[in-house]
Image: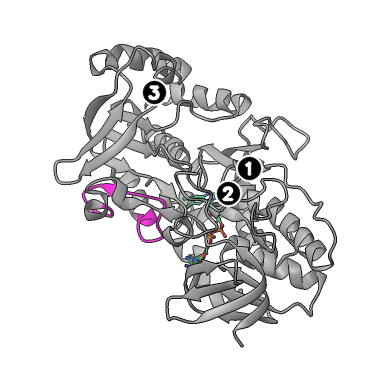
Amino acid sequence: MNHYQILIIGGGNAGLSVASQLLLKNKNLQIGIVEPSEKHYYQPAWTLVGAGAFDIAKTEKKEADYIPQNTTWIKEAVVTFSPEKNTVACTNGTEITYDYLVVCPGIQLDWKKIDGLTETLGKNEVSSNYSFNTAPYTWELIKNFKGGTAVFTNPATPIKCGGAPHKIMYLACDYWRKKGILDQCDVHYVSGAGVIFGVPEYAETLKKKVAQYNIKVHFGANVTAIDGKSKTIFFESKEQPKDLETKFSTLQASCYGITENQAEASISKVSLNFDICHTVPPQSAPDFIKKSPLADANNPLGYVEIDKHTMQHSRFKNIFALGDCTNAPCSKTGAAIRKQAPVVVENLLQLIANHPVTASYDGYSACPIPTQYGKLMLAEFDYSNKPKMTFPFDQAKPRWTMWILKTKILPWLYWNKILKGTA
Ligand SMILES: Cc1cc2nc3c(=O)[nH]c(=O)nc-3n(C[C@H](O)[C@H](O)[C@H](O)COP(=O)(O)OP(=O)(O)OC[C@H]3O[C@@H](n4cnc5c(N)ncnc54)[C@H](O)[C@@H]3O)c2cc1C
C-alpha cells in the first residue's frame, strides 16, 4: 500500500512520540512512518558520554524495537514533497500519498561549513559530542589533558540543545579542578552568541561558573576553519585582537562584551592555537526540506514554516511539523517535543473530525545544564524567555537531584515512556 491516512516523516524523538500518542487516542488510525535509519539514538546523553559519565552503548537502540505496533515502517528516506498532490517521493523512487502529513526529520549538522573540520574530527585532539562516533573521543581528550589550551566552540546558527556546547566545558573544567590542574588550563569559549544563555535568571548562575573556572569568552565569534595538524582554530570576531587580553579580564566577570561594542568594533580574523578542541557544527534544516515547498522562504536556514502555536503548516493545512526541523522560535530540544507532540496530536485529530484546531504550544523548552559533576541547573522557559519552573524550588540553583534527573530518570523515561507516548 502506498497510501496512509497519516504519514510521519522521521522516526526520531518527535515522530515516534506522535505516532504512539495518536494510537493511544485512536488505535484504528492508519499510520506510516518513513525512517531510513536502523538505529535510534538518545542524543541528550552524548554530553554525559563526552564527560565519561554515561555509556555510549546505552544511547543507541534498534529502531525496530521502538516503532509502535500497528504502524507501518517504510525504511526509506524522503527526497521531495508535493504538498499540492499530497505526495512524497523517496530515494528509491517510491511515491507515497497521504491524507495528513507530520514532518519531523530533525536538523542537519553542517560540518562542512567549518573548513577542515570533517578531515580532522575524531583525531588531532578535535572532537564533538554532536556525533555518536566522536562523543567518546571527547572524554579521551578531557581525561588525558595535562594542561594547556582547551577551546570549546558554539556556532552562530540555532542548534539542537543550545546548552550542549558549554555544558561539556563546565564538566571538563570541574574534572580538571578535581585533578588539581585547572590553574594550568587556558580555557576558551568561542561562541557565535552574544550572551552565555538567553534567559537572564539562568545566565547569572552560568556567569559565576565561567568566572570561577576562569574561562575566557569570545562572544560574536564565528568559527570558519580548523586546522587539526597545526592545532589552530580560525574565527571571525567583532573584537579587536589587540584588546583581547584586557577584554578577557573584564569579560570573566560579566560574560558580555563583544556584542555591546558592535558599533565601534570591526570584524577581525582571529586564530587561536589549542591543545584540545570541542566543536559544534553550524546547523540548518535538512537540505531536502530547504529545497521543498514546505520551507519558510524568509528563513535563511530553510526550516518548515508553521504556526508557532498550533504547529500546523502556514500554507498546507493538512501538514504539521514539530521537533528540530521547524521555524518555531523555541529552543530545539527533546523537552520542547514533549510539549509539542500532544499539541500536534490534538490538532490533527480535530482536523480529521472537521473541527477547528485549538491546541496551542507556548514555546516551552528545557535545558539541563550540569555546572559540575553531581550538580545541574534545570533551565525551563517558554517563548517569552522567562523562567517556567516545574519544581517548587529555585531551579537556577544547581542541584544534585536535577543531576539524578538528567543522568538516570530522563534516559529511562525516554526509552520506556516518551517514545511510547505515555509521558
Ligand atoms: C549533544 C546533544 C545534547 C542534547 N541534549 C539535550 C538535552 O539535554 N535535553 C533535550 O531535551 N534535548 C537535547 N538534545 C536535543 C534532542 O536530542 C533533539 O532536540 C531531538 O532528538 C529532536 O528530535 P527530532 O525528532 O526532531 O529529531 P531526531 O530525534 O534527530 O530524529 C530525526 C529522525 O528523522 C530521520 N530522518 C532524517 N532524514 C530523513 C529523511 N530524508 N526521510 C525520513 N526520515 C529522515 C532520522 O534518521 C532521525 O531518525 C541534545 C542533542 C545533542 C546532539
Q: Quick check: is the Cβ at mark 2 less than 8 Å away from ligand 1?
A: yes
- Residue 122 % position (x, y): 28, 55
Question: Label 1: which residue?
Answer: 366
Q: CA distance from mark 2 to mark 1?
A: 7 Å
Instruction: Compute the Cα span from label 3 to label 2.
Output: 29 Å
| Side (left or right) of 54 relative to 156 | right
Q: Are marks 2 and 1 in contact (CB under 8 Å)?
A: yes
The disc placed on residue 333 is: 2
The quarter in which the C terminus is drawn is bottom right
Task: Look at the image and give the residue range highlighted in magenta.
Answer: 121-136
Question: What's the residue at 79%, 78% (across, down)?
Answer: 27
Label 2 sits on what residue type?
Answer: Thr
In the picture as drawn, the residue positioned furthest to the bottom comes out as 1
Q: Which residue is mark 3?
A: 214
Residue 365 versus residue 411 in the image, above or below? above
Residue 288 % position (x, y): 44, 62
Q: Residue furthest left?
A: 230
Numbered disc 3: secondary structure: loop
SS majority, magenta: loop
Q: Is residue 220 magenta?
A: no
Residue 396 vs 329, above or below: the answer is above
